[in-house]
Amino acid sequence: MDFRLTDDELAFGESVRTWIEAHLVGEFASLRGKGGTGQEDIPLELHIEWERELARGGWLGLAFPKEVGGMGATVMEQVVFHREYVAARAPGRFPNMGVNLAGPTIAAYGTEDQIARFIPSILDGSEMWCQGYSEPNAGSDLANVATKAVLDGDQWRISGQKVWTSLAQVSDWCFVVARTDPESVRNRGLSYLLVPMDQDGIEIRPIVQVTGGTEFNEVFFDEAVTDANNVVGEVGQGWEVAMGTLAFERGASTLGQQLGFQQEFDDLMEVARKTGAWDDPVTRQDLMKSFIGLEIMRYNNLRMLTVVDQGGVPGPEMSIGKAYWSEWHRAFGELAMRVRGAVGMTGDEPTSPESGLDSYLLDGWQRTFLYSRAHTIYAGSAEVQRNILGERVLGLPREPRP
């Protein structure tokens, strides 16, 4: 790919800037600079409403083909959008599992009826999605899924438990990996089901994080139902579809997040200069290492997106990006605490009694540090990413199985 911007791409960037300035007003004006990874500093309802404002502008369909109602933007136009969005300090993007994961998966693997039913409501922001992958005994080892689904007439009946389900409490649908062949083991006999969340057979229990937030949830399925035709791909072939979803998770949708890291770095540089931490040669060297890491991250992501630009489905090489950014941001959180010094160890004021937390309010840097500890665990741990790269990209022998 040639990453120099054409006149059309420059004009596209101007249209993005113009739209953001015209719409980030009124109740949305207070969102500037908020909503970064793990910050939880925007009310959930308002964050969703901003996502729907983006939908009204057509931006949720940025990467979707025109034939399914999307904008059909090129990879470079997607790069331009995310760059301009972050430059405007527009709020960190709501983790929209429909736009980033369910939608691309349905568009790539779904039937015409599934595309017609689900893609429009994803792109207009009227239906939200969550991901039913991880289980108590099947986190990074997704092939160990125990949640089962049994075909009963024209419906699947689903029983089991999922955990770490992001924003299940506001979701209308969940894409669930379940075992549909009771005799199968590991990654065989799994199916990829689309399940409505508003039903008696589903119970959602929030998980209170160390930051005090409740983004993640446990979800219990007790004879929950979905229509028999809500299977993406073939019955029993859910592993391939699930891996496709993970590849989309590490594709173009990460651009906004990674450009947000650049803003975090710029803000930390300001803190370092104000506090004098910049004058310490070791801290200054570590800040520059962090900057170099950002640049490597950016170019590596652009290189990987050439697969998408050529019309392909992202493959296991996308694990390079996940492994790299997760470890970079975890180290960045530690560096931020060093730059802050002793003041970073205390809170400004106690939490309200209504919160149920016997602690102090966390500031943004403290939330970044605490939340970033999870980056090398969720969405596939760092160890699993290395196994994928070793076995599926480099062709190394498989890790011994018990």
Image (cartoon, helix red, strand yellow):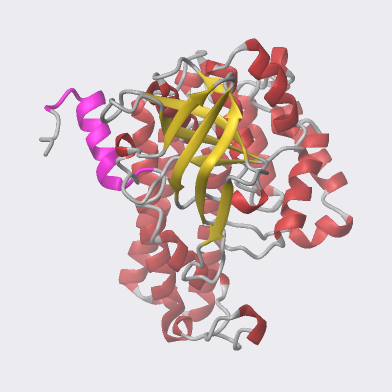
Viewer-proximal residue among 62 and 110? 110
| Horizontal arrangement in the rendering, residue 24 relative to residue 331 (left or right) | right
The residue drawn where x is 50% and y is 80% is 275
Is there any visible trace of residue 4 in the rendered image?
no
Q: Quadrant of residue 354?
A: bottom right
Q: Is residue 173 positioned above or below 398 on the image?
A: below
Q: State the image coordinates of residue 74 (x, y, percent, origin top left).
A: 62, 20
Residue 39: in magenta span: no
Q: State the image coordinates of residue 302 (x, y, percent, origin top left).
A: 47, 30
- Magenta-highlighted residues: 380-397
Q: Is residue 397 positioned above or below 95 on the image?
A: above
Q: State the image coordinates of residue 168 (x, y, percent, origin top left).
A: 59, 49
Looking at the magenta stretch, what is its main secondary structure? helix
| Horizontal arrangement in the rendering, residue 145 relative to residue 15 (left or right) | left
Looking at the image, how many numbered discs can be counted on the residues? 0
Q: Quadrant of the C terminus?
A: top left
The residue drawn where x is 46% and y is 28% is 150
Is there any visible trace of residue 87 in the rendered image?
yes
| Horizontal arrangement in the rendering, residue 75 relative to residue 396 (left or right) | right
Q: Quadrant of residue 205?
A: bottom right
Q: State the image coordinates of residue 32 (x, y, percent, origin top left).
A: 73, 58
Q: Is residue 216 positioned above or below 125 on the image?
A: below
Viewer-proximal residue among 351 and 164? 164
